Image: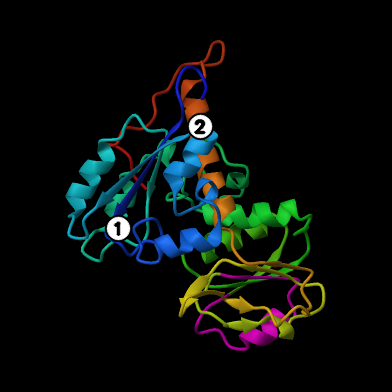
Amino acid sequence: AQRGRSPKLVVVTVGSAALGRTHPDGARRLQLFAPSDVSWFSKAATGAAVGVEVQEVDLAADTTTQELIAELRRHSDADGLQLMWPLPASIDAAQAYAAIPRSMDVDGAHFRGRPDMVAPTIGTHPPVGCQGIVRVLEDHGVSLEGKHVAVIGRSWLVGQPLSQLLSAKGATVTLMHRSSKNLAELCAAADVVISAAGHPGVLDVSILKTGVVVVNVGTTFKDDDLVPDILPTGDSHPASLLVHSVGPISVAILLRNAAENAAARQAPPALGATEVNSPSFATASS
């Protein structure tokens, strides 16, 4: 808490398809991934552990676009808003995400891959999953300068913004998807392989070169086991680093973004500067 109040994050989920607390797999993922005070699947408890107030708002799957936008507008006191993806097909996603002001966007809804966003300021945060991947690599001393990074999955949530972040760090990035040919061959030549495909066993780590760094973003339940995209082959594999999940670091970054926004909103203007109000919900756009 700073300047008399705790940072506040509001997480809005519509229906149960989004991979969070309301997802059918949410409770089991909470058991498997991490303790409840450091988990993507228990954001309120995780926030409480570090002094961030998290309010989770769960809306019915038949919520309309206008009802969702009205709900988002109710939380003008929040320092951050996260609208969980995916949304039901009946909702106009572009309108809904455009209703989140940039000054409250802690989850990268407005990210456009600008190089200056690698060091985010208020309202310019990249998607938290992508930030989490970069942070894991940095924490393990993995330099990206001049490296060949293979990214599997081209979603706008992970693959596309991640490729932009990695490029800004000096990496040469190959972005692959379901139509890509010679996926295994391309990955076998890479220094770093990151998979966000959500297809268990999309690649076997044994085909990769010695010393490769592997990061799994996608995980899928198979029976009662949580299986990563890139499967290890016993205790012996060529990877120098094999990361199974970035969920715990992603939720930590989400809370950090909200705290940074809170500090920026409450900071007094610089001497001689003119104070500028945050964008209102009525005028926010993507």
Viewer can see residue 110: yes
In the displayed structure image, the side of residue 84 where residue 66 appears, left or right: left
User: How many C-alpha atoms fall within 10 Å of the one at disc 2: few (<14), some, or many (≥20)?
Assistant: some
Q: Residue at x 75, y 59 (%)?
A: 144
According to the picture, the residue beneath numbered tag 2 turns out to be 51
Residue 234 picture quarter: bottom right
Mark 2: which amino acid?
Gly
Q: Is residue 126 left or right of residue 137?
A: left
> Please, what is the three-letter code of the amino acid marked with disc 1?
Ala
* Quarter of the image where one finds residue 100: top left
Counting other residues with Cα less than 10 Å from the Cα at mark 1, is it few (<14), some (14-19), or many (20 or more)? some
Give the labeled residue for mark 1: 93
Instruction: Let me know if residue 113 appears in the view.
Output: no
Give 226 or 258, whichever is nearer the viewer. 226
Q: Earlier in the sequence, mark 2 or mark 1?
A: 2
Task: Answer whether residue 148 is magenta in the image.
Answer: no
Most foreground residue, 247 or 88: 247
Where disc 1 sits, the SS reads: helix
Measure the C-alpha gap from mark 2 to mark 1.
Answer: 31 Å
Q: Which mark is residue 220?
A: none
Up-down relation of residue 188 to residue 1 (above or below): below
Q: Position of residue 267 (x, y in %)?
A: 52, 20
Q: Residue at x 61, y 49 (%)?
A: 115
Q: Secondary structure at mark 2?
A: loop
Which residues fall within the magenta stretch?
176-195
Q: Identify which residue is drawn at 56% across, 53% down.
A: 248
**Viewer-nearest of labels 2 and 1?**
2
Q: Where is residue 79 shown, x and y percent of the image?
A: 42, 33
Which residue of the protein is positioned furthest toward the top in this rendering? 272
Q: Is residue 251 left or right of residue 190?
A: left
The structure residue drawn at horizontal position 52% and vertical position 45%, both measured from the top left corner, is 37
Q: Position of residue 230 (x, y in %)?
A: 62, 77
